[in-house]
C-alpha cells in the first residue's frame, strides 16, 4: 500500500514501542508504516552519540534484536566491554561489539554535519527495513531528572542508579526550542493518514517500574 492509499503513523519509545511497531510492520502492506522515534533518551557516552530508542527500533524491525535482554543485538559479543573494564573505564552502560559499531558510525556521520534523520534513514535502508523510521526531531532534546542527588541525565538515573533516587522533577532540556522533524509534521498533516498510535508505559506503580527497569537495564554484566 502506498501513502496515496493511506498509511499508519506510530509514535514510539523503545522496547514497548518497538513491539507495537513490529506488529504493525508485519500486518501492514509494504510502505504503509511510518514510525517516529523518541529521542529524549538520547545521550553522549564514552564520546559516542547514543540513541537507545532508535536503535531498539532498528534492531527489532530488522530482526536483529535480542529478545532475552530486550535491548541490543542478538548473538552479541562483549569483547569491548571486558577490555574497557580491564582498563578502568566506565562499564555501567553495556555496549555490545555489534551495537558499538552503530554508535561509532552514527557519531562519525553526525560530526560531518549529517542530520540524525539522514543517518537513521540510511541505517534503516541498509538493514532492509521498508518502513519509514524518523527521529521526533533533529534538534537536541534530553530528559533530565531532579533527585535528592541533584540533576541526573535519564540514562544515569535509569541504568546506572536503577531508578533508585526519588524523582522530584522532570525536565526536557531543549524541548522548548526543538523543531519537530519535517517529514513527521508532513505525515501528521497528510490527508492520506488513516491511523496513528503510540505506546504509553508510564501508568504503573513505582515498584513495577523499578522491577521492570532492573530486568531491562543495560547495566547488567555482559554474558
Image (spheres, rainbow, N blue to C red):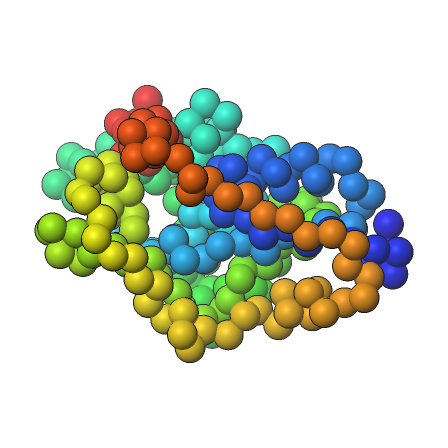
Q: Residue at x 49, y 69 (%)?
A: 138
The image shows residue 142, relative to residue 147, as above or below, that is below
**Residue 140 appears in which quarter of the rendering?**
bottom left
Q: Residue at x 77, y 36 (%)?
A: 27
Q: Residue at x 15, y 35 (%)?
A: 86
Q: Is residue 84 visible?
A: no
Q: Residue at x 80, y 45 (%)?
A: 30
Q: Position of residue 74 (x, y in %)?
A: 49, 28
Q: Is residue 65 visible?
A: yes
Q: How many numbered marks are there? A: 0
The residue nearer to you, when weighing 86 against 93, is: 93
Q: Position of residue 99 (x, y in %)?
A: 43, 41
Q: Position of residue 162 (x, y in %)?
A: 24, 36
Is 108 positioned to the left or the right of 144 in the image? Answer: right
Is 100 positioned to the left or the right of 27 in the image? Answer: left
Kindly give the residue lying farthest to the bottom in the view shown.
177
**Residue 24 appears in which quarter of the rendering?**
top right
Q: Position of residue 58 (x, y in %)?
A: 56, 45
**Residue 89 appears in which quarter of the rendering?**
top left
Quarter containing the C terminus: top left
The image shows residue 220, relative to residue 169, as above or below, that is above
Amino acid at each position: 500500500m502506498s501513502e496515496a492509499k493511506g498509511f499508519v503513523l506510530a509514535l514510539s519509545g523503545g522496547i514497548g514501542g518497538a513491539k507495537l511497531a513490529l506488529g504493525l510492520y508485519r500486518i501492514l502492506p509494504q510502505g504503509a508504516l511510518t514510525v517516529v522515534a523518541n529521542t529524549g533518551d538520547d545521550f553522549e557516552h564514552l564520546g559516542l552519540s547514543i540513541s537507545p530508542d532508535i536503535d531498539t527500533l532498528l534492531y527489532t524491525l530488522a530482526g536483529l534484536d535480542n529478545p532475552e535482554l530486550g535491548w541490543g543485538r542478538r548473538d552479541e559479543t562483549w569483547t569491548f566491554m571486558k577490555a574497557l573494564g580491564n582498563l578502568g573505564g566506565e562499564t555501567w552502560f553495556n555496549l555490545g561489539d555489534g551495537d558499538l559499531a552503530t554508535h561509532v558510525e552514527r557519531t562519525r556521520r553526525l560530526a560531518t554535519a549529517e542530520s540524525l534523520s539522514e543517518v537513521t534513514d540510511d541505517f534503516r535502508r541498509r538493514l532492509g527495513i521498508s518502513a519509514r523510521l524518523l527521529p521526533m526531531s533533529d534538534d537536541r532534546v534530553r530528559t533530565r531528572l531532579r533527585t535528592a542527588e541533584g540533576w541526573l541525565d535519564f540514562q544515569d538515573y535509569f541504568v546506572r542508579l536503577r531508578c533508585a533516587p526519588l524523582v522530584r522533577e522532570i525536565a526536557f532540556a531543549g524541548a522548548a526550542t526543538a523543531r519537530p522533524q519535517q517529514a513527521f509534521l508532513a505525515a501528521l498533516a497528510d490527508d492520506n493518514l488513516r491511523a496513528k498510535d503510540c505506546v504509553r508505559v508510564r501508568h504503573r506503580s513505582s515498584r513495577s517500574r523499578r522491577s521492570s527497569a532492573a530486568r531491562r537495564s543495560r547495566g547488567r554484566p555482559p554474558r
